[in-house]
Image: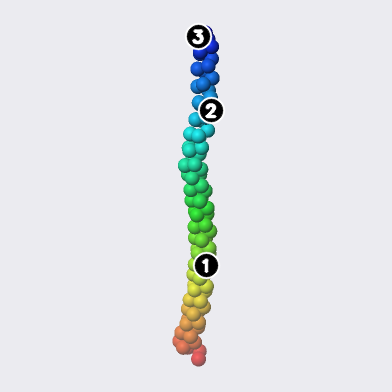
């Protein structure tokens, strides 16, 4: 009789655990999945920021190079003018 009660009690506990387990697991998966989603979104935002930074750096670099070449050309032009004005052979 005692063994039968233990078996019935054990089976009852297993059934209750089977019913309660998935319900508690489903509640835990939602916040966990929310955290995963937030992590993925953060990762994608960081990638987008990196791409935008790279693009801006390239554009800035090109603009600086173009400006430096323009300044160098004007400096060379000014130096020629000064040389022409100060040339004693003229």
Residue at the disc numbered 3: 2
Q: Secondary structure at mark 3?
A: helix
Query: Which colouring convention does the figure follow?
Result: rainbow
- Identify the mark nearer the N-term, 3 or 2: 3
74 relative to 30, above or below: below
Residue at far front of view: 1
Q: How far apart are the two marked residues, 3 and 1, measured between alpha carbons?
A: 83 Å
Coordinates of residue 50 in the picture (x, y in percent): 51, 56
Which residue sits at x=46%, y=84%? 82
Mark 1 vs mark 2: in front: 2
Label 2: which residue?
A: 18
Which residue shows up at 53% across the image and 15% down it?
A: 7
Pointer 3 and pointer 2: residues touching (CB < 8 Å)? no
Q: Callout 2: 10 Å neighbours few (<14), some, many (20+)?
A: few
Considering depth in this image, is 71 or 6 the residue closer to the camera? 6
Label 1–label 2 contact, CB within 8 A? no
Q: Secondary structure at mark 1?
A: helix
Q: CA distance from mark 1 to mark 2?
A: 61 Å
Q: Determine which of the numbered discs, if any, sits on residue 76 in the image.
A: none
Q: What residue is pinned by disc 1?
A: 59
Q: Position of residue 58 (x, y in %)?
A: 53, 64
In-front residue for pair 8/26: 8
Q: Is residue 90 above or below residue 17?
A: below
């Amino acid at each position: 009789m005692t063994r039968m009660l233990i078996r019935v009690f054990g089976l009852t506990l297993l059934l209750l655990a089977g019913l309660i387990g998935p319900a508690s697991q489903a509640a835990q998966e939602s916040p966990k999945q929310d955290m995963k989603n937030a992590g993925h979104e953060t990762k994608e935002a960081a990638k987008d920021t990196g791409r935008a930074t790279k693009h801006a750096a390239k554009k800035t670099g090109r603009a600086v190079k173009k400006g430096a070449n323009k300044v160098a050309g004007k400096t060379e032009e000014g130096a020629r003018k000064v040389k022409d004005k100060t040339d004693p052979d003229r």
